[in-house]
């Protein structure tokens, strides 16, 4: 069913939304002037499943391959990916809804058409596109074919690796980390069910919850945890406890560290959320999405200037 293979040339991708079309619809022109190039950071291996694959199988593939999405193909000869299913889709549309992932097919929850960006664009362009479309993954095209994928994690990795890049700019403006972190801590009891956790994430439109035991913060549960240890296990989300899948102890960073420090920790540990502590107490949570959003906001004057010059 699923396959882990390098994207091949010659696969048609009719129905894909090209980045130029998307930006024209939204009145935004791609700048392509600053930041590392997408082709240098994109992942050229894709997890692809047929449209009649069950969500539980797709969730299993995400867990095994440690990826945040799978592409969906129609099965028709010569036709490429027709949609994408992400961890967020599974959590909000399946787990939170109490739907059985073993009988729900990926084409029932996928996002279609796929949103794409050219490999010769910059990672800053990608950050604007993700922020504009409220997504965490972009399919990358070369010569009209899907050649790879980039995620918010790849963006952060590129920002950290680029000397004098976006993270350096943020370091000069946002210190300490309390300026950028979320201080409204969303929590859940460790004995709550996965179903409760998924519904809270859906309703609050967030990707993680800090877990509490006896009034103390002891860990964190994320969308990835719900996918890899919940939906993929084919167990009833109403009977699985958060304590069985949370990450503990809680990974954290001191509030006085730099954004580059926080970005590097998230990139090296492969996480999207990082607790922030002050005097030994957890006072906030910093997410990859927060970083990408702020990079996009800071770069907007240049981005809009490029748009103006092309209008």
Image: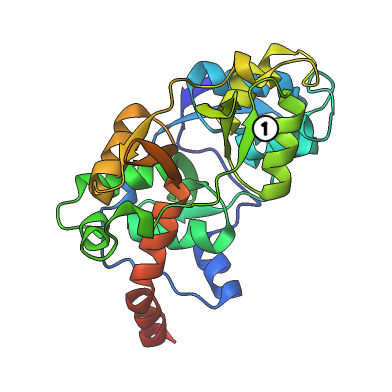
Check disc 1 and report the residue beneath it: 77
Tell me where residue 214 sits by quadrant.
top right
Reply above or below: 250 against 244.
below
Q: Nearer the viewer, residue 39 or 231?
A: 231
| Crowding near the residue tagged with mark 1, few <14, some 14–19, many ≥20 C-alpha atoms within 10 Å | few
Color encoding of the figure: rainbow
Q: Nearer the viewer, residue 262 or 186?
A: 186
Q: Nearer the viewer, residue 46 or 268?
A: 268
User: Is residue 79 visible to us here?
Assistant: no
Q: Could you say where residue 21 lies in the image, as x and y percent from the top left? A: 56, 67
Secondary element at tag 1: loop
User: Is residue 268 visible to us here?
Assistant: yes
Q: Work out which quarter of the rendered image holds the C terminus and state it.
A: bottom left
Q: Could you say where residue 284 lies in the image, as x and y percent from the top left? A: 45, 46
Q: Residue at x 61, y 52 (%)?
A: 16
Q: Nearer the viewer, residue 271 or 111?
A: 271
Tell me where residue 41 sits by quadrant.
top left
Q: Is residue 14 left or right of residue 301?
A: right
């Amino acid at each position: 069913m699923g396959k882990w293979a390098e994207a091949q040339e010659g696969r048609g991708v009719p129905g894909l939304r090209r980045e130029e079309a998307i930006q024209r619809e939204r009145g935004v022109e791609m700048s392509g002037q600053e930041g590392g190039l997408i082709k240098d950071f994109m992942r050229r291996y894709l997890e692809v499943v047929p449209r009649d694959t069950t969500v539980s199988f797709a969730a299993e593939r995400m867990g095994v391959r440690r990826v945040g999405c799978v592409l969906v193909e129609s099965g028709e000869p010569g036709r490429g990916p027709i949609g994408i299913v992400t961890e967020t889709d599974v959590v909000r549309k399946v787990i939170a809804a109490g739907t059985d992932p073993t009988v729900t097919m990926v084409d029932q929850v996928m996002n279609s058409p796929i949103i794409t960006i050219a490999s010769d664009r910059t990672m800053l362009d990608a950050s604007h596109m993700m922020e504009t479309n409220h997504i965490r993954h972009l399919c990358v095209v070369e010569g009209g074919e899907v050649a790879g994928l980039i995620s918010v994690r790849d963006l952060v990795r590129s920002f950290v690796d680029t000397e004098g890049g976006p993270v350096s700019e943020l370091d000069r403006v946002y210190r300490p980390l309390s300026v950028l972190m979320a201080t409204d801590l969303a929590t859940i009891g460790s004995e709550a069910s996965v179903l409760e956790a998924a519904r809270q994430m859906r309703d609050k439109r967030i990707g993680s919850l800090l877990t509490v035991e006896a009034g103390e913060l002891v860990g964190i549960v994320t969308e990835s945890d719900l996918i890899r240890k919940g939906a993929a296990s084919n167990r009833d989300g109403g009977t699985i406890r958060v304590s069985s899948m949370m990450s503990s102890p809680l990974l954290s960073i001191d509030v006085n560290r730099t954004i580059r420090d926080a970005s590097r920790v998230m990139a090296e540990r492969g996480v999207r959320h990082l607790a922030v502590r002050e005097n030994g107490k957890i006072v906030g949570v910093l997410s990859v999405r927060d970083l990408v959003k702020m990079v996009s906001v800071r770069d907007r004057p240049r981005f809009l200037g490029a748009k103006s010059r092309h209008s």
